[in-house]
Image (cartoon, helix red, strand yellow):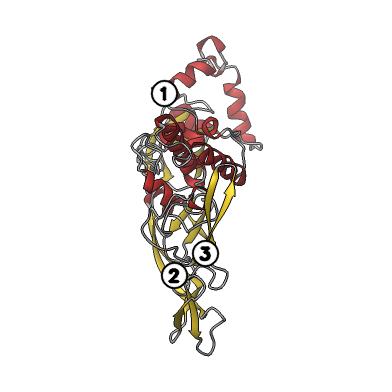
Amino acid sequence: MAKRDFYDILGVAKGATAEEIKKAYRKKAIQFHPDKNPDNKEAEDKFKEAAGAYEVLSNAEKKQRYDQYGHAGVDGQGGFSGGGGMNMDAIFSHFGDIFGGGGGGGRSGGSPFESFFGGGNRGGGSRQAVGSNIRIKLKLNLEDVTNGVEKKIKYKKKVVAKGVTFDTCGTCGGQGQVTRVQNTFLGQMQTASPCPTCQGMGKKIKNVPPGADGMGLITEEVTTTINIPAGVADGMQLNVRGKGNEMPGGVAGDLIVLVEEAKHENLERDGNNIIFNLHISFPQAALGADIEVPTVTGKARIKIEAGTHSGKVLRLRGKGIPDVNGYGPGDQLIYVNVYTPKKLSTEEKAIMKQLLDAENFTPDPSKERGFFDKMKDFFN
């Protein structure tokens, strides 16, 4: 059975903002939540379907692949986008922030929907405080994105100062959250919210060493090594788990790396293909030539056939950029441009005049192949 479009599943337009996508998923999750639809297989399937759509559309990198390639761009990439074999508990923990609950990704105990449906502690633990994320930009050259690269990054982050001590929070008893029961049109429901005393840590700072702020944090410069996979593109985000700001009594946030792709001196990227504009002289085009051209991995020699026209495209298969999803590399496309000089010497003009009426230099459109015939060769 054909897979449904993720935007249709959530009921949003393709150009929807991240906040609109989140609101749409929240609405669907409430509508089809298992606690609200007990023993309803259809509702459970729709709940999973919405989770799968949100898992892709809420991730900038996956959304970009889905917008470009459809389901083929995100299938087999992990998470919940694979279909009906999703585990409900995994969904609950994975989207821990959808209702302002936990930190997501297994960091928050219990279902993120508990505050709406009183679903119990599915995760088997108390809410764990999470430090804030850090966002940095990383400039990569064409060689980096083609081959993949390991980068050492220096940045500043908040870390827990040495000597910080804690007491268990008396308000929440170390749970990090407080609960209350209220009556709604759905019946009696339990709501949970971060503890106002400890801000969800479950602990109160007892001793703060000199130089630390009120949370027991100091700022330090750190170095982190990250592996950049081949095929990343400008605007993609890489998430490095646990390398963000620390949280006393909790876990560190994430380091989010925004890829910026620097322009190459001679080569241009077009998706997974690499473009090179080759300029040759008229004699080279007429007589043919062996020419050296740059590639990302070095130099390559190509043969220019005698009689080559301006606009011809030559292809070096597999000399492009590897697909970030593992579908194989693109090609290097060489666009041939025949150079026409604007100034000629007296001797050069005399030679050109001799050729002006020569039979082989007289254009014959009947012998020229049309644009669409050339395009057939290009895509074959």
Q: Which residue is located at x 53 percent, y 90 percent?
A: 210
Q: Nearer the viewer, residue 354 or 75?
A: 75
The residue pinned by badge 2 equals 250
Label 3, secondary structure: give it.
strand
Query: Can residue 273 be seen at all in this image of the molecule?
Result: no
Q: CA distance from mark 1 to mark 3?
A: 45 Å
Q: Work out whether mark 1 precedes mark 3 in sequence or the reverse, and give the earlier one.
A: 1
Q: Work out whether mark 2 precedes mark 3 in sequence or the reverse, and give the earlier one.
A: 3
Q: Nearer the viewer, mark 1 or mark 3?
A: 3
Q: Nearer the viewer, residue 18 or 227?
A: 18
Q: Nearer the viewer, mark 2 or mark 3?
A: 3
Could you tell me the amino acid type at mark 2? Answer: Gly
The residue pinned by badge 1 equals 2
Label 2, secondary structure: give it.
loop
The residue carrying pointer 3 sits among few (fewer than 14), some (14 to 19) or many (20 or more) residues within 10 Å by Cα, namely: some
> Which image quarter is the C terminus in?
top left
The residue carrying pointer 1 sits among few (fewer than 14), some (14 to 19) or many (20 or more) residues within 10 Å by Cα, namely: few
The residue carrying pointer 2 sits among few (fewer than 14), some (14 to 19) or many (20 or more) residues within 10 Å by Cα, namely: some
The residue pinned by badge 3 equals 178
Could you tell me the amino acid type at mark 3? Answer: Val
Q: CA distance from mark 2 to mark 1?
A: 43 Å
